Image: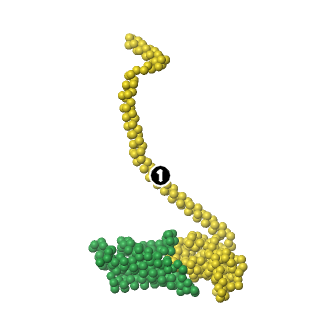
Chain colours: A yellow, B green
Amino acid sequence: MAIIAGAVLLIAVNVIVISVMVKYGQPESGIEKTALYISAPFQNAFHYVVNGSKNLWRHYFFLVFAARENEQLKKTLQAVREKNRRLAEIELANIRLRGLLAFRETIPYATISAEVVGRDPSHWFKTIVVNKGTGQGVRKGLPVVTPEGIVGQVIECTSGYSKILLAIDQKSAVDAMIQRTRTRGIVEGDPGGGFNFKYVLRKEDVRVGDRVISSGLDGVFPKGFDLGYVSGVVRPTAGMFQVVTVLPSVDFEKLEEVLIISNPPAHAFMEKR
Amino acid sequence: MRFLQTTAVCLFIVVFNTAMVPFLFFPQYVFDPAVPYILFMSLLGSGRRAFGVSAGLGLVMDGFSGAPLGLYTTAYLWMTAAMRQVSTLIRVDQVWMIQLFAGLGVLFEAVMLLGMTALMDPGFRIPPTAAERIGVQMLLAAVLAPFLFSLLYRVVPTWNPSANESRSRSGTKPWRTTSKG
């Protein structure tokens, strides 16, 4: 009982003292100053150690985790980049195939679409290999085109693959005409990679920039397909013909998909052969 | 096993020439890797195998090419015969010799193919950049041939008994990497 009474008394005295101190403020004394003077450097040292440890953790040990995270992020980035590249490739293929499909619908012939799978191993002959053959209805002699124009002619077939002689090969020749003036001639492959428009009479009006199209008279290529644009005209002082060079409208270095015309128009002279 | 390894190398050469080259930088300067391979087989393979590989590879290349059938085969067989004949007269055991013959092999093949292109053309025309292309190809072949020979020596089985003996005995290559003098 006495203990309880003592405790209550102590609490009461304590509350009164604190109330008085709140009212009159803390009196200045040398004890606090001395305590502060002695303990502050230790506090400072403790603070320095704690902060130093924090920094050490954050900038060194934590870096191990950061390095791991970085590695993981790099892998993710690589995967995303790869996916992005693939999607870009699909997008480009989609654009090309849409173009090819749209073109296919505009021409009045049955076509077989094919992908380029190989090129001529030599630098001097110009052929490509496509992934469609006799099994898909391809046969020797069929014309090959793209939306940009004439590509070439099928020269060999197996059941699943065909070899195509490109129009820029020196052995290739296409009966052609200038669209503007209907001037006829033969477009032959040039060793430099373009075309020569041969047998154009000197009197004919041919200008740089004129569009050259197939005439349809060779019995292979249907009429009206693009071959290219006249890039140079030379009228020699002697001789019957002009020297006309043509820039191909098809980029033969970047061929990826082509259309093989499976029912080209047959001429009477072809049927008699 | 030898047959499979040889077939794999030939297949790689064909795929490289017909499908990979267009994707490389400056494809016009890439030389035909069949040339160092044929030279390698001519030097280190038996005659039967060397001619067999040349004929087989040549026929496949002819099949892919727009060149007249037999042109590649002829070029490869001539190359094999010439290299084998040369190896009976002089000992091709120096790196510079391999470089020289690789360069000459590329030149020989290019001249044959280009010659045929020109012969088939009514105007006997050749591409204006032909000399530059062939020159760079020869240079590249000469630079890379020793490396290709070392690679082939590791991956391709040879039939020449002395070459195999040398390989199994000391693990060294049958050609020297430094000159005698």
| B15 or A77: nearer the viewer | A77
Q: Quadrant of the C terminus of chain A?
A: bottom right
Q: Is residue B171 left or right of residue B67?
A: left
Crowding near pointer 1: few (<14 within 10 Å), some, many (20+)? few
Q: Is residue A47 something one can see in this rendering?
A: yes
Q: Is residue B108 left or right of residue A220?
A: left
Q: Quadrant of the N terminus of chain A?
A: top left
Residue receiving disc 1: A73
User: Which residue is painted at 38% across and 74% down in the image?
Assistant: B146
Q: Chain of mark 1?
A: A
| A178 or B1: nearer the viewer | A178
Residue B96 image point, x, y percent: 36, 77
Amino acid type indicated by mark 1: Leu
User: Which residue is painted at 52% across and 78% down in the image?
Assistant: B129
When the figure is inspected, residue B106 is found, relative to residue A96, above or below; the finding is below
Residue A52 image point, x, y percent: 39, 40
Residue A42 image point, x, y percent: 36, 32
Q: Is residue A222 something one can see in this rendering?
A: no
Helix, strand or loop at label 1? It is helix
